[in-house]
């Protein structure tokens, strides 16, 4: 797993130069292929990124289940043979299982895995709908599309890019909100472990309202920091 190459970051590709000597139908096809390629690249990005979280999620959940079973069986083993295992080890196993769940919760491996799958499937649905709509609109157009037909085809392209961008923005907003929840949960856990009473803001707080607005203005309330 360490030798596996990390998926490249998603970036917006440059629009190719449009050759005016070609027909309008060819240019429209090129524009659609460009938008289609961007969505396909985003789908491949989510497919590649979900492999790591899926492995961590399954490993941590399996380890937590095993530790929970060991912790439950420890008193029974001790009752059967007191010299085999001390009952105190049951608390250690149970604490280890709870630690695995907390580790997964804070770092969001299971949440990232499901989020990547959900976003990838939503992008595929948007792409399939746009492909069907493009084929229907293009076949109705003439060999030399009129202004109205060109506008209809451009609308399909614009809708495809807008819907895909909206899905990715919602996924990013959900990630920011989950990250804020994980930070606050980690703050509460460390405060309880140290015997302190956590404040309302913890060590620091991420502004989740801006994430819910999908790139909108930040919330009016100030952010509390440790500084």
Image (spheres, grey):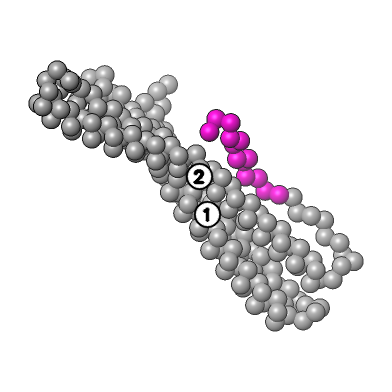
Left or right: residue 19 versus residue 102 is right
Q: Is residue 60 visible?
A: yes
**Magenta part of the chain:** 1-13
Q: Does the residue at mark 1 contact the one at mark 2 (Cβ under 8 Å)?
A: yes
Majority secondary structure of magenta residues: loop
Task: Tell me: 184 left or right of 87.
Answer: right
Based on the displayed image, in which of its 4 quarters is residue 192 positioned?
top left
In the image, is residue 194 above or below residue 109? Answer: above
Disc 2 residue crowd, few under 14, some 14–19, many 20+, Cα 10 Å? many
> In the picture provided, is 40 more to the left or to the right than 188?
right
Q: Quadrant of the image for the C terminus?
A: top left
Can you identify the residue that label 2 sits on?
50
Rendered residue at 21%/30% (across/down): 71
> Is residue 3 in the magenta section?
yes
- Picture residue at 41% right of the left edge, 34% below the top: 107
The residue depicted at 11 percent of the width and 20 percent of the height is 82
Query: Residue 206 occupies which quadrant of the picture?
Result: top left
Front position in the image: 109 or 31: 109
Query: Label 1: few (<14), some or many (≥20) within 10 Å?
Result: many
| Mark 1 or mark 2: whose residue is earlier in sequence | 2
Spatial CA span between label 1 and label 2:
10 Å
Q: Is residue 219 visible?
A: no
The residue to which callout 1 is attached is 120
In the rendered image, residue 5, in percent from the top left (x then y), is placed at 61, 35
Label 2: element kind: loop
The mark found on residue 22 in the picture is none
């Amino acid at each position: 797993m360490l030798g596996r190459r990390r998926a490249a970051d998603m970036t917006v590709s440059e629009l190719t130069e449009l050759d005016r000597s070609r027909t309008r139908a060819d240019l429209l096809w090129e524009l659609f292929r460009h938008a289609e390629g961007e969505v396909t690249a985003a789908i491949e990005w989510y497919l590649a990124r979900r492999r790591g979280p899926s492995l961590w999620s399954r490993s941590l959940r399996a380890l937590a289940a095993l530790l929970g079973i060991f912790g439950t069986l420890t008193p029974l083993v001790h009752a059967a043979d007191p010299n085999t295992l001390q009952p105190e080890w049951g608390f250690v196993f149970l604490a280890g299982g709870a630690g695995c769940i907390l580790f997964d919760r804070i770092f969001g491996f299971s949440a990232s895995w499901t989020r990547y799958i959900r976003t990838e499937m939503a992008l595929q649905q948007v792409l399939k709908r746009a492909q069907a709509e493009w084929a229907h609109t293009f076949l109705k157009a003439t060999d030399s599309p009129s202004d109205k037909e060109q506008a209809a085809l451009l609308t399909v392209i614009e809708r495809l890019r807008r819907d895909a961008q909206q899905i990715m923005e919602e996924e990013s907003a959900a990630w920011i909100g989950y990250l804020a929840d994980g930070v606050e949960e980690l703050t509460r856990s460390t405060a309880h472990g140290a015997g302190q009473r956590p404040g309302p803001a913890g060590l620091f707080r991420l502004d989740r309202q801006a994430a819910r607005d999908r790139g909108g203005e930040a919330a009016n309330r100030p952010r509390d920091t440790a500084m």
